[in-house]
Image (tube, rainbow, N blue to C red):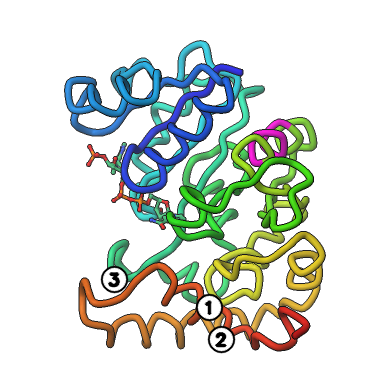
C-alpha cells in the first residue's frame, strides 16, 4: 500500500520504520520540511516530502502529531479524496495540548478530531507507548503477540487500517465506531496496558465512560508529579494497568 505519514516524532518515525519494513511504500512529512527527514528516509526507505505533497497518491494517510494540533491539518485533509482513510494516532494531553473543554467533559477524542477536521477518522496506534510499537510487534500467530484496538465508523476504511495494524506486528481488534473511541483513550482499561487479544476484548467491554474520565484525570495528576526524564515507558504501562485494576484486566 502507499501510505502517507504526517508527523515524524516518536510515533510517526516508528510507524515509518515498521510499515516500510512490512513492504509498504511510505511518504513522510513534518513541519520542518524534507531536508530534516533525510536520515529517517535513508534508514527506512521512505520518501521525505512536504506537507503539501504528502496526501497525494496515497491509499491511507496516518496522522502522528499532537492532538491539539490536529485542526491545523483540516485544509490539507480537505484536498484528500474522501475514500482515503485517515488513521489518527493522537491522544489528548492537556499539559501539551492546553485544556479542551469538550474533551474534558467527555466528548470522545475521536469525535473531537473528526469534528475539527470535518472528515471521518479511524483511531489506531494511539493506545500504546512508543516502545511497545518499536519493540513488541510479533509475527502473526506468535504466542506473545499483543493486540491493538482500532475504532471508526466507515467499514472499508477501518478494514484497511486493521490490516496495517496487523502488518506492524499486533493483533488488530475492532473497537467499534468513532463514538466508541472513549473505550481506547487515556483512562480506559484498553489504553497503554499491553494486552493480548482476549484481554483486550475484555478490557473494551469493561470500560465505563464516567470511570474512564475519572481515571484519565487521576493518571494525568500522577504523571504531573513525576520528575521529567526520571521515568520510563514501562512506568506508564504499569500506571495505566494499575489504574484499570491489573488483576481484573490481566486475569492473574
Ligand atoms: N510517544 C508515544 O509513546 C505515543 C504513543 C501513542 C500515541 N501518541 C500520540 O501520537 C502523537 C505524536 O506523538 P509523538 O510522541 O510522536 O510526538 P512528537 O515526538 O512530539 O512528534 C510530533 C510530530 O508532529 C509534527 N507536527 C507537530 N505539529 C504539526 C502540524 N501542525 N502539522 C504537521 N506536523 C506537525 C512534528 O513536526 P516536527 O518534527 O517538524 O517538529 C513532529 O514530527 C501525539 O498525539 C501523541 O499523543 C504518542
Residue drawn at (52%, 23%) of the image: 3
Q: Circle 1: is it few (<14), some (14-19), or many (20+) Cα within 10 Å?
A: many
Instruction: State the image coordinates of residue 32 (x, y, percent, origin top left).
Output: 18, 31
* In the displayed structure image, the side of residue 111 where residue 51 appears, left or right: left
What residue did someone put label 1 on? Answer: 240
The outermost residue toward the top is 57
* In the displayed structure image, the side of residue 155 where residue 134 appears, left or right: left
Task: Decide which of 116, 145 is in the foreground and name it.
Answer: 145
- Above-or-below relation of 4 to 240: above
Asked if the residue at tag 2 contacts the one at tag 1, i.e. Cβ–Cβ closer than 8 Å, the answer is: yes
Q: Main secondary structure of the magenta part?
A: helix
What residue did someone put label 2 on? Answer: 243
Sequence-first tag of 3 and 1: 3
Instruction: State the image coordinates of residue 195 (x, y, percent, origin top left).
Output: 68, 66
Task: Decide which of 134, 129 is in the foreground and name it.
Answer: 134
Which residues are the magenta region? Answer: 160-165
What residue did someone put label 3 on? Answer: 95
Instruction: State the image coordinates of residue 170 (x, y, percent, origin top left).
Output: 66, 48
How far apart are the two marked residues, 1 and 2, measured between alpha carbons? 5 Å
- Above-or-below relation of 66 to 44: below
Residue drawn at (53%, 39%) of the image: 118
Task: Decide which of 105, 127 is in the foreground and name it.
Answer: 127
Asked if the residue at tag 1 contacts the one at tag 3, i.e. Cβ–Cβ closer than 8 Å, the answer is: no
Sequence-first tag of 3 and 2: 3
* In the displayed structure image, the side of residue 126 where residue 72 appears, left or right: left
Amino acid at each position: 500500500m502507499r501510505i502517507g505519514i504526517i508527523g515524524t516524532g516518536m510515533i510517526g518515525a516508528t510507524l515509518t520504520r515498521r510499515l516500510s519494513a512490512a513492504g509498504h511504500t511510505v511518504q513522510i512529512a513534518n513541519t520542518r520540511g524534507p531536508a530534516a527527514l533525510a536520515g529517517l528516509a535513508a534508514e527506512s526507505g521512505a520518501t521525505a516530502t512536504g506537507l503539501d505533497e504528502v496526501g497525494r497518491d496515497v491509499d491511507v494517510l496516518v496522522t502522528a502529531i499532537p492532538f491539539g494540533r490536529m485542526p491545523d491539518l483540516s485544509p490539507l485533509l480537505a484536498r484528500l479524496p474522501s475514500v482515503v482513510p485517515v488513521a489518527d494516532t493522537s491522544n489528548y494531553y492537556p499539559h501539551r495540548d492546553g485544556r479542551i473543554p469538550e474533551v474534558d467533559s467527555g466528548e470522545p477524542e475521536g469525535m473531537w478530531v473528526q469534528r475539527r477536521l470535518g472528515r471521518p477518522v479511524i483511531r489506531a496506534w494511539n493506545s500504546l507507548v512508543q516502545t511497545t510499537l518499536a519493540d513488541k510487534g510479533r509475527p502473526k500467530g506468535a504466542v506473545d503477540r499483543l493486540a491493538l484496538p482500532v475504532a471508526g465508523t466507515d467499514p472499508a476504511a477501518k478494514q484497511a487500517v486493521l490490516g496495517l495494524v496487523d502488518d506492524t506486528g499486533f493483533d488488530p481488534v475492532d473497537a467499534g465506531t468513532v463514538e466508541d473511541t472513549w473505550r481506547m483513550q487515556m483512562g480506559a482499561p484498553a489504553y497503554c496496558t499491553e494486552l493480548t487479544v482476549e484481554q483486550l476484548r475484555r478490557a473494551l467491554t469493561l470500560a465505563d465512560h464516567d470511570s474512564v474520565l475519572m481515571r484519565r484525570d487521576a493518571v494525568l495528576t500522577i504523571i504531573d508529579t513525576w520528575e521529567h526524564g526520571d521515568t520510563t515507558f514501562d512506568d506508564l504501562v504499569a500506571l495505566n494497568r494499575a489504574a484499570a485494576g491489573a488483576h481484573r484486566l490481566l486475569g492473574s
